[in-house]
Image: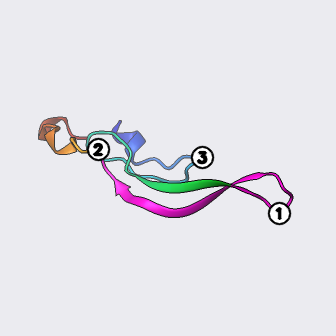
Amino acid sequence: MKVLRHTPYPSARGYFPYNVNGLPIVDFYKREVVRGPDGKPLIATRETVVKASKDPYWQECPEQNRL
């Protein structure tokens, strides 16, 4: 897990870091399906709802178990 936390790799969401408990720290976005220029559905990102969201219980991970 330590190696994974510090190794960049291709991801559909792009780069994201991992917290000390091994869960990713990610942004959450408000998205909407709209009609594209060609009339087909298109997913549009409207805003960032939560920036750098961490697992709410990460601080309960004991120091000796943190990665």
* Residue 6 % position (x, y): 40, 48
Helix, strand, or loop for circle 3?
Answer: loop
- Relative placement, left or right, of 52 versus 12 is left
Q: Which residues are magenta?
A: 34-55
* Residue 39 % position (x, y): 84, 56
Alpha carbons under labels 3 and 2: distance apart: 20 Å
Q: Residue beneath label 1, please?
A: 37
Look at the magenta stretch and give its main secondary structure: strand
Q: Residue beneath label 3, please?
A: 12
Decide which of 24, 29 is in the foreground and name it.
29
- Relative placement, left or right, of 11 versus 21 is right
Decide which of 12, 3 is in the foreground and name it.
12
Q: Assess whether residue 49 is covered by the magenta stretch.
A: yes
For the residues carrying marks 3 and 2, which lies nearer the camera in this image?
2
Specify the amino acid type for callout 3: Ala
* Residue 50 % position (x, y): 38, 58
Q: How crowded is the residue under tag 1: few (<14 C-alpha within 10 Å), some, or many (20+)?
A: few
Q: Assess whether residue 53 is covered by the magenta stretch.
A: yes
For the residues carrying marks 3 and 1, which lies nearer the camera in this image?
1
Decide which of 63, 58 is in the foreground and name it.
58
